[in-house]
Amino acid sequence: MRNLHNNFCMKTLVAMLASLIFASVASADGAPRLRLWITDPIGADASQCVRSESSTDITRLLGIPPTLTELDVTSWDMADARWQLNPDRFPASNARQQLEDHCFALMLDGELISRGVVLSSYSARLIRFPTIVVTKRGQLLDLRLTSSFYGSSMKPIHVKALDAVLQSRIQAPPPINTPSQ
């Protein structure tokens, strides 16, 4: 029993240290502030997406490039908590299959803030944990992070944290190109 407790404490300490190190490196080297990993297909039981030993465990993901970052976002609407993906990188016709019905892990500023499942806005699944809802608008894809995918209990979550990252990204003026002399 004592070994189990020590093992749990050690794993927790390692995960916390990895997160702190990652956060300091991310902020120091200009790395993306928003990192979203799309991992395993969800299959019949999507609950594996929120278990700590799942493919969304952050210690496993730190060595893998994220599926998308804030650099892939072309617009952000805080009022509706939706962000739109760059259609050149995520064309709606192909990207939906890569995103929908998979697990996700979302990190902002080096901190894992959510993990759950990515679903189409037309999905028939009823999910009671974090969900990224994908909506196709012509050739564009919108994403919305919600508390669940279960009727009226669907509320946007982490809106202020997302706004802090995405609003600064979207409103950042383009670099000024000056001709060489």
Image (cartoon, helix red, strand yellow):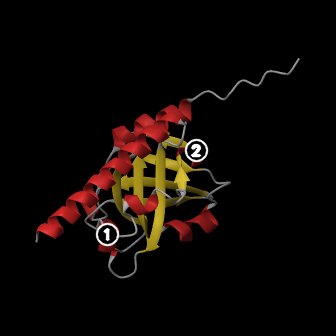
The residue lying toward the viewer, choosing from 111 and 150, is 111
Residue drawn at point x = 64 percent, y = 54 percent? 87
Q: Quadrant of the N terminus?
A: bottom left
Crowding around mark 2 (Cα neighbors within 10 Å: few <14, some 14 to 19, many 20+) is: some
Q: Residue furthest front?
A: 3
User: Residue 101 occupies which quadrant of the picture?
Assistant: bottom left
Q: Nearer the viewer, residue 67 or 31?
A: 31
Q: Could one spot residue 93 in this view of the protein?
A: yes
The vertical placement of 35 against 37, above or below, is above
Q: With 124 as the anchor, is 87 left or right in this view? A: right
Q: How far from the left and from the top, in percent, is residue 104?
A: 42, 62
Determine whether the residue tagged by mark 2 lies in a helix, strand or loop: helix
Q: Would residue 169 be found to the left or right of residue 78 on screen?
A: right
Q: Is residue 124 left or right of residue 74?
A: left
The quarter of the rendered structure image containing the C terminus is top right
Q: Is residue 76 left or right of residue 152?
A: right
- Pointer 2 residue: 71
| Residue that lies at the very extreme toward the right in this rendered image | 181
Q: Tag 1, which secondary structure?
A: loop
138 vs 71: above or below: below
Q: Which residue is mark 1?
A: 53
Dividing the picture into quarters, in which one does residue 53 lie?
bottom left
The disc at residue 174 is none
Real-space Cα distance between discs 1 and 2? 29 Å
Q: Position of residue 176 (x, y in %)?
A: 72, 23
